[in-house]
Each structure stands twice: as structure tokens, then as C-alpha cells.
Amino acid sequence: MTTKTTQAGEGPVIETDIPARLDRLPWGRFHTLVVAALGITWILDGLEVTLAGTVAGALKASPVLQFSNLDVGLAGSAYLAGAVLGALFFGWLTDRLGRKKLFFITLSVYLVATAATAFSWNLWTFMLCRFVTGAGIGGEYAAINSTIQELVPARVRGWTDLVINGSFWIGAALGAVGAIVLLDPAYLSPDYGWRAAFLIGALLALVIFLMRLWLPESPRWLMTHGRIAEAEAIVAGIEARMRAEGHVIPDTPLPKVRLRARASTPFSDVFHTLLHRHRGRSAVGFVLMAAQAFFYNALFFTYALVLTDFYGIAANQVGWYILPFALGNVLGPIVLGRFFDTWGRRPMIALTYTMSGLLLAATGWMFAEGMLTAQTQTIAWMVIFFFASSAASAAYLTVSETFPLELRALAIAIFYAIGTGIGGIVGPWLFGTLIETGSRWSLFGGYLFGAALMVIAAGVMLRWGVAAERRSLEDISRPLSHID
């Protein structure tokens, strides 16, 4: 028997080796299915964001909407504003109600709002639908990242997290290919192609419902809420399936943790943990999130506008330029992810943030000087985001593994919300305004600002970051309910 429950104080005291058993597991079919089931959500998000970016030209050409560049930027900011508020609200619910239940709530919000976007008739209805869509996706970030951390063994947690988050760009590639067809006037008129794009995104969300049905609730979440029998059954079931597959799992004693179960975590505990107990980690998480959010959202939400306004690329051809861009983003976590678990979090995060900033500054200068074509600009973005994709994913990895279990989802949501609120909402609006001026040098100024944020974030991580590689979550940050 690996679990013991006694009564003491406010709730039952639980002594269990469930965290150690989860970290001991060899990689098996279960973990592959977890990656697939959670990664497909990121693919969906990538599809969603890419469609929104690649249809920018179509939205401007639409006889009904007739968007300006500024309107496109505002729509991007509305999506991100929804993601910020959705992350906070659904992140709070995820820690209270569980990871699995929120999977279906947030997905339902996304599905309905995306379908509604296809029927927008002016800027305000489009922005409202994008806002609600963002709320659904924002809620997904908290639930999924916390689940990844709590189900995947510590020795491969970094690589797995980066690859799952990097799968966003598989969706981006699919969105780019879809845009090539849907925005071609030979197939659909300018006012129907972009509508079909959003409807397809809603239809694809239905597939995720089926893939998530078999996903278990996080045993770590269950044990802190006193549902130890359920947690024990889930872990035992995973071990049994792995043994049936031929994996050897020794039945030897493992370190145990002692917890006092709690139904919920008061906000006073949350704020004390973030602002006092772990204020250094909070500062690191804030800087990493804000820098990558500005960098990514400012550049990607206006990528299509740069191609159409400065290089004369037709709106229905933008998808071809998204494909190599997406390839660089996918390859980055796959190639570099292993080093986050071997070389370590601090040096790898500092490296990827620094390289992203320096390469953006150099590319921005070449763009301002008129030294690039649409093709060489795309190659430059591909190289930059080979590093930036790992950097952005590592920001989520950092905030999800360096805070206690009881507030993990809410911590992810808070830092995502603050970082995106500062870096993500302002970014698309600012860059949309800079593009509207028609000045390459004005846009270069924006690029320099984004590059500086990334380099500063690298220094902060190198100086104050936590070396979390190959360590159990309970070792990195003891649960608030831990009893000595």
C-alpha cells in the first residue's frame, strides 16, 4: 500500500508516493497519447491564429468589413485581450474544479465563438467574437500546461513541454495551406473565403472532444484535494498498462510526500506565494512572459501586413510564406528541447532569448535598408523563430514548474495574462500603427524594442532563474499543503 490517510487539523493528512511513481515511469504509449491529445489543442490554436493573420488581406478586401491595417491590429488585440481574461478566469477554475473538467468547458467556448466569427458583419461583431474565442484559448493554456507538468516524468518534462507547445506551428502550417485555397478568388469570393476559414476551425475543434475522453484527471491534483483513492487508481492503471506493454517498473519503495488535503486555495495564499514566498520566481516569470508575448504577437499578427504592404505579395499568396516560417518554429523545440533537460533551463533559456533578440535586430536593420526580398525576409524569420519558438515555450515551462501544485494553473494564467496584457495586446496595435505609416525605419524601431526585451529577459533568467531540469515538481516547489 503506497498511500496512507489520517485525520489531523483542517483536513485529512495524506502520505503518498504518487509523485515519485509518476516520475519513475518509463516513456510509454500513455505518454505518447498525452502528447497527442494535448498537442492537438496547440495545433488548433496555431490554426486559429494563422487564419486570423493570413486573412488580414481578405478582411481589408471584404466588401462588408472593409478593414484598415489599424482595424486588423485591433482585432488581433481583441483576441489577445480575451485570452488574458479567459486565462485568469478559467485558470482559477482549473485549480478549483480540476484539469480535465476545464478541458471541455474552454473548448466549448472556443468552438462556439469561432463559428460565430464566420458570421461577423462589422468591426465590432468581429472583435467581440475574436475576444470570446481568445477567452477559450486562454483557458486552455492554464489547464494544458499544468497537466503536462503533472503527468510527464521529470527527466523529459522540458523537452515534452516544448514539443507540445511547439506543435502550435503545425496548426500554423495547416492554416497557411488552408488560406491558400480558401482565399483564392477562383474558389470562393473575397467575402466568403475568410468566413469558411473560421468555420473549418470550429469543425476541427470537434475532433478534440473525442481525443480528450480518455485523458485522466491529474493524480497530483486529486491527491491534494483528498481524492486519494481516485489518484491511486489512475496511477495503478497507468503502471498496469505499461507492464502489459513490456515495460519493467520495479515495485520498490519510493520517497513519499505528506500533505493536508484542501478543497481550495484561498487568494491570500496565492498572493502570499507569488508576492512574498516566491517573488523572485514571479519576477522571472513576468519578464519572460512579457518579452516573448510582445516579440511573438507583434511580429506574427502583422506578418501578413508586412508581406502585402512592403513586398506587394497578394493576400491569397501569404500562406506560402507562412509555411517555412512555421517549419522553423516546429523544428526549434524538437532540435533544442533535449538540451533544456540536459544542459539545463537557465543556460538554454538565456541562449534562445538572446539569439532571438540579436537576430531580430539584425534582420530589422536589413529590412529598413531595403536589403531583403519577400523570400529572404521569410528565411530570416525562419531562422529567428527557430530560437524564438523554444524561448516562448520555455516561458510557459518556467512558470508552470516553479510554483506550488495548488496554484499551478492560476500561476500560469496570471503570468500569461500580465505578460500578454503588456506585451501581446499592445504589440499588434503598435505594429499595425507603424505599418500604417509606410515607413520601414519606423517599423525597425518596433523591431529594436522587441529585440531589447528579449535580451533583457535572457539576462534576468541567467541571473535569477531556477535550475528545474530533471527535478520533481515537489522538489522544485513544495506544495502549500506539504507537512514536514
Image (cartoon, rainbow, N blue to C red):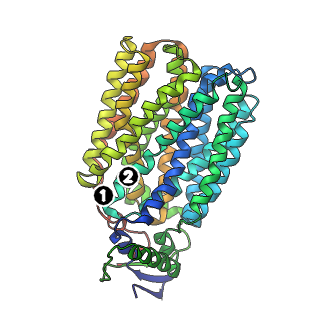
In terms of secondary structure, where does tag 2 sit?
A: helix
Front residue of 128 and 422: 128
Front residue of 159 and 278: 159
Give the residue displayed 30% in from the left and 57% down from the top: 468
Is 317 placed left or right of 200 in the picture? Answer: left
Instruction: Identify the amino acid type marked 2.
Output: Thr
Give the residue displayed 35% in from the left and 16% down from the top: 366
Residue 459 location, quadrant:
top left
Q: Give the number of the disc on residue 44.
A: none
Give the residue displayed 34% in from the left and 68% down from the top: 26
Task: State the image coordinates of residue 467 (x, y, percent, origin top left).
Answer: 27, 55
Q: Which residue is mark 2?
A: 398
Task: State the image coordinates of residue 476 (x, y, percent, origin top left).
Answer: 33, 63
Q: Which residue is mark 1?
A: 468
**Disc 2 from disc 1: Cα separation:** 8 Å
- Note whether residue 10 is visible: no
- Note whether residue 73 is visible: yes
Q: Give the position of the N terminus as an image quadrant.
A: bottom left
In terms of secondary structure, where does tag 1 sit?
A: loop
Is 305 placed left or right of 1 in the picture? Answer: right
Task: Tell how many labels.
Answer: 2
Q: Are marks 2 and 1 in contact (CB under 8 Å)?
A: yes
Asked if 477 appears above or below 248 in the picture, the reply is above
Instruction: Identify the amino acid type marked 1.
Output: Ala
